[in-house]
Image (tube, rainbow, N blue to C red):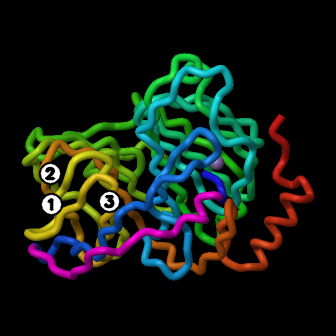
Amino acid sequence: MTNSTMTNSTMTDDRRTDRTENPQSKAWQTVRKGPSRHWVGDGFPVASVLSPQPGRDGVDPFLLMDHAGPAEFAPAERPRGVDSHPHRGFETVTVVFQGELEHRDSAGNSGSIAAGDVQWMTAGSGVLHEEKHSAEFTRQGGVLEMVQLWVNLPARDKMTSPRYQELLADDIPTVPLGDGAGQIRLIAGAFGEVQGAATTVTPVTLWDVRLAAGGRASLPSPEGHSAAVYVRQGELRLAADSTVAAGELAIFERSGSQVDLEALADSEFLFLGGEPLDEPIAAHGPFVMNTRQEIVQAIDDLRAGRFGTLG
Ligand code: MN
């Protein structure tokens, strides 16, 4: 959400294996436990599950994943959140699970998103962005939970014009899964004949999955694509002796064409991946470009007021 997420890099790679059971099945490579939470602005206690750090094995084209909450907020007068901050070179995707947020940006977009809704913002050449608890949520208080992801843009599209997709819960297709044991909400990426809600620049998959205890699923993931699972609630089994618990991210090998898993408890998780960009990353706080020179240019452009204004 802001550059403060860059300061926390204490994720641990605590298990590694390359075992697999079905030859079509992607073997899991790493299971990472998220770090302890830190505050982003005064509104979002987040665990940074992924960070845009060169040299780490990631989930290309995903750069960052922050999981905020679930956290209870008392009724208040002044909305908490993150004041004006820039972004350039990627997209920010905000998925709300509980509570309500309001956001606006210097491209003139604004709106509020509540449980089930998604904001997919293409920062491209640059916006100023503000993210706050909604006025209503602030007044009433309650539980807030959301995930924010940063999706990288390919070099040719990093300076594209900013745009914005508001994907309300009713706009996001849901497909049943695992013999009635669950469902997938297709935020981005097709499942069979059903298209995901978001328009993406490169092939990106982002699914919000629920699977009841004992349910099994084989999630398609094309050969060569990145794939990862982040468990928000419950616990999944990936192979005979490997599990992913709440707060953990499992990253899979690119080879294979599906991800097989089983819910050991009623589980809610995000399935993410896509076609890797495999391009150099130069990351500096809210700017993610390909070269250091482009970072210097971004800082210069921000200082010169070329990111516009947020009135
Ligand atoms: Mn932002």
- Residue 7, compared with residue 190, is above or below; it is below
Residue 82 is inside the magenta segment? no
Instruction: Look at the numbered discs 2 and 3 and tell me whether their residues touch, using CB distance below 8 Å.
Output: no
Name the residue rendered at 84%, 43% in the picture.
309
Find disc 3 in the rendering and name its residue.
248
In percent of width and height, residue 252 lies at 29, 71
Instruction: State how far apart marks 1 and 2 are (Cα).
Output: 6 Å
Q: Secondary structure at mark 2?
A: strand
Q: Return the mark for residue 263.
A: 2
Residue 5 lies in quadrant: bottom right
First in sequence: mark 1 or mark 2? 1
* Range drawn in magenta: 4-21
- Secondary structure state at the residue bearing disc 3: strand
Q: Amino acid at mark 1?
A: Arg
Q: Nearer the viewer, mark 3 or mark 1?
A: 3
Residue at the spot of label 1: 237
Q: Amino acid at mark 3?
A: Glu
Q: Are marks 1 and 2 in contact (CB under 8 Å)?
A: yes
* First-in-chain label (2 vs 3): 3
Q: Position of residue 233 (x, y in %)?
A: 27, 45
Mark 2: which amino acid?
Ala
